[in-house]
Amino acid sequence: MVRKENHLGVSELHAHYFSDLIGHTVTSCFGVSGMANSGASQGLRQFFFKNNRFVDQGVAVSESDGELVVELHIIISYGVNISAVVDSIKNKVRYTVKEATGMNVKKINVFVDAMKE
């Protein structure tokens, strides 16, 4: 749970909300072919539910000092400029999270796990 306190009260947002929001944002970026598994729990979930595609796959969100720390594992298209794609992802994720929730993103770690033709 991510807690945000303001003059109106306290809001609690579940980490799955941020994972879904960020997953949709990242997969809509140019050059991103998909998301990769970011841990054993996501690998097990994919093993047991083979027909389901999870948009939050490859996204891990945590909170540090009232700001979000995001870890992304992506698959990019072959032939694109990796640094340009990563910069685009970072900018778009920061903007989308700020617009949707009003929270700041402290750090975004992007790991390119694979390339796809």
Image (spheres, rainbow, N blue to C red):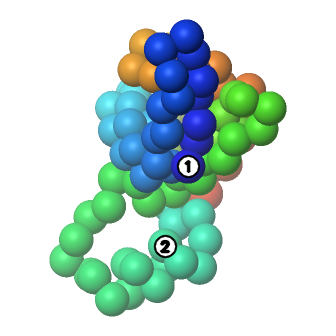
User: At 19% across and 77% down in the image, what residue appears?
Assistant: 51
In the displayed structure, 114 sits above or below 68; it is below
Q: Is residue 59 above or below residue 52?
A: above
Q: How many marks?
A: 2
Residue 62 in the figure: left or right of residue 12: right
Residue at 49% over, 39% down: 12
Where residue 48 appears, as percent x and y from the top left, is 33, 89
Residue 25 image point, x, y percent: 39, 32
Report which quarter residue 113 is drawn in.
bottom right
Q: Which residue is mark 2?
A: 42
Instruction: Give the labeled residue for mark 1.
Output: 1
Q: Amino acid at mark 2?
A: Gln
Q: Image point 33% across, 32% down: which residue?
A: 28
Query: Could you say where residue 85 lies in the image, as x and y percent from the top left?
Result: 55, 27
- Do we see residue 87 in this rendering? no
Disc 1 element: loop
Q: Single out the residue that lies furthest toward the bottom.
A: 48
Residue 50: name its quadrant. Answer: bottom left
| Image position, residue 6 (x, y; %) | 57, 16
Looking at numbered disc 1 in the image, what kind of residue is underneath it? Met
Secondary structure, mark 2, is helix
